[in-house]
Image (spheres, rainbow, N blue to C red):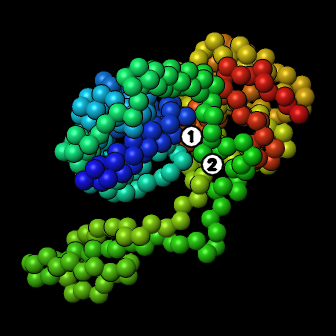
């Protein structure tokens, strides 16, 4: 039993630390995932939305610290009960997402490791079992260091996590696992290979045959039935290939001009997923660096999910010498964890990407 508890302790502790550190690298992305859970379409808890970032930071630091505490064997009762509470909460969320198909990615490992809803739920069920096992056999969990050393390690972990999260929030994630990382080519990321798996659908056709409903399931072909057609239900039984970038457009009056802009040799793209929520003070610097880019022969555009009236107000207020185009908000949040942020592209390849706090780092080579 002692060996089983020790192995479980190491596995759970390391997994919590790994999961926490991955999300700690991108707390803004995790906060977007929490906002998705809080939306009316999922849990309908909109009053939590303004606190999503603070909650994300607290949860990921707690996740790391609990993993450290478990490995140390320090304050085991508080640690185990806290782990149980956290895993019960996340098991509920992942089951809800999987069963009702509300959130397609739980964000458990950020953008580094993508899990389907049922994979996420299965992972949480395994962790729940192991944590219950640890609670049962907690007498076998003994501290590996003295109280003073354990406390020092825990405090050091909290301080290190706090400093790191402050860095990535005020700049950009240290590691970028998204398809819009520096060096990535956006058009290439949108390509579907000719031999890519196609989605497979199942169709349930319902007919009224002599006053009785009859349902016939096919793979798409319309069945020959001597009766009145009532309706059809479509179910995806196998997902097709989805390219890494599948929701990127740059629209003007409903026309997608992404291909045109991605062919520009020297392009500066100002990204502001929501101008109403953007850091207004950054636009003085945006004005300065975009004017400098224009002087050096760059094409400059803005992309936002905000309406035309708000975009025009920002252009007029800050005397911006570029136009804003419409791009889906989720895509913009994925492109850069900064509102606003700036990208420098060469024929669709991202050469530079900076947070608004780091605009002075742009070189425009």
The reply to whether dot 1 and dot 2 touch (C-beta < 8 Å) is yes
Residue 43 to residue 117: above or below: above
- What residue sits 84% from the left and 39% below the top? 266
Image coords of residue 98 (percent x, y): 31, 53
Around disc 1, counting alpha carbons within 10 Å, would you say few (fewer than 14), some (14 to 19), or many (20 or more)? some
Q: Nearer the viewer, residue 223 or 280?
A: 280
Image coords of residue 28 (percent x, y): 51, 30
Residue 7 to residue 145: above or below: below
**Residue 305 visible here:** no
Image coords of residue 168 (percent x, y): 59, 27
Left or right of 135 in this view: 352: right
The residue wearing badge 2 is: 179
Looking at the rendered image, the quarter that the C terminus falls into is top right
Residue 334 numbered mark, or none: 1
Around disc 2, counting alpha carbons within 10 Å, would you say few (fewer than 14), some (14 to 19), or many (20 or more)? some
- What residue sits 53% from the left and 45% below the top? 111
- What residue sits 39% from the left and 34% below the top? 144
Q: Nearer the viewer, residue 261 or 188?
A: 188
Residue 32 numbered mark, or none: none
Left or right of 213 in this view: 181: right
Left or right of 228 in this view: 183: right
Q: Nearer the viewer, residue 7 or 278?
A: 7
Residue 337 to residue 310: above or below: below
- What residue sits 37% from the left and 70% below the top? 237
């Amino acid at each position: 039993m002692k060996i089983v508890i020790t192995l479980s302790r190491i596995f759970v502790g390391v997994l919590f630390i790994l999961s926490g550190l991955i999300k700690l690298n991108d707390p803004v992305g995790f906060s977007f995932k929490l906002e998705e859970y809080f939306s009316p379409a999922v849990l309908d808890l909109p009053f939590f939305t303004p606190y999503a970032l603070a909650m994300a930071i607290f949860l990921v630091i707690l996740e790391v610290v609990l993993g450290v505490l478990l490995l140390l064997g320090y304050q085991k009762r508080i640690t185990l009960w806290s782990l149980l509470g956290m895993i019960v909460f996340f098991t509920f969320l992942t089951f809800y997402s999987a069963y009702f198909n509300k959130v397609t990615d739980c964000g458990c490992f950020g953008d580094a490791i993508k899990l389907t809803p049922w994979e996420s739920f299965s992972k949480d069920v395994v962790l729940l079992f192991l944590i219950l096992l640890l609670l049962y056999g907690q007498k076998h969990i003994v501290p590996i260091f003295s109280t003073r050393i354990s406390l020092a390690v825990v405090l050091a972990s909290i301080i290190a996590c706090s400093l790191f999260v402050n860095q990535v929030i005020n700049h950009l994630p240290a590691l970028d696992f998204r398809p819009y990382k520096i060096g990535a080519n956006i058009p290439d990321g949108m390509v579907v290979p000719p031999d890519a798996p196609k989605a497979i659908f199942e169709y349930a056709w319902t007919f009224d045959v002599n006053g009785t409903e009859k349902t016939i399931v096919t793979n798409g072909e319309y069945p020959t039935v001597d009766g009145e057609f009532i309706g059809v239900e479509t179910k995806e039984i196998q997902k097709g290939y989805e390219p890494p970038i599948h929701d990127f457009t740059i629209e003007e009056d409903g026309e997608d001009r992404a291909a045109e802009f991605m062919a520009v040799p020297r392009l500066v793209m100002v990204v502001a997923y929501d101008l109403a929520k953007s850091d207004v003070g950054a636009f003085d610097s945006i004005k300065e660096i975009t004017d400098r880019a224009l002087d050096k022969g760059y094409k400059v555009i803005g992309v936002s999910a905000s309406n035309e009236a708000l975009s025009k107000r920002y252009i007029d207020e800050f005397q911006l010498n570029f136009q804003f185009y419409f791009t889906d908000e989720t895509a913009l949040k994925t492109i850069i964890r900064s509102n606003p942020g700036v990208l420098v592209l060469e024929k669709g390849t991202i050469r530079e990407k900076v947070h608004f706090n780091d605009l002075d780092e742009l070189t425009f080579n």
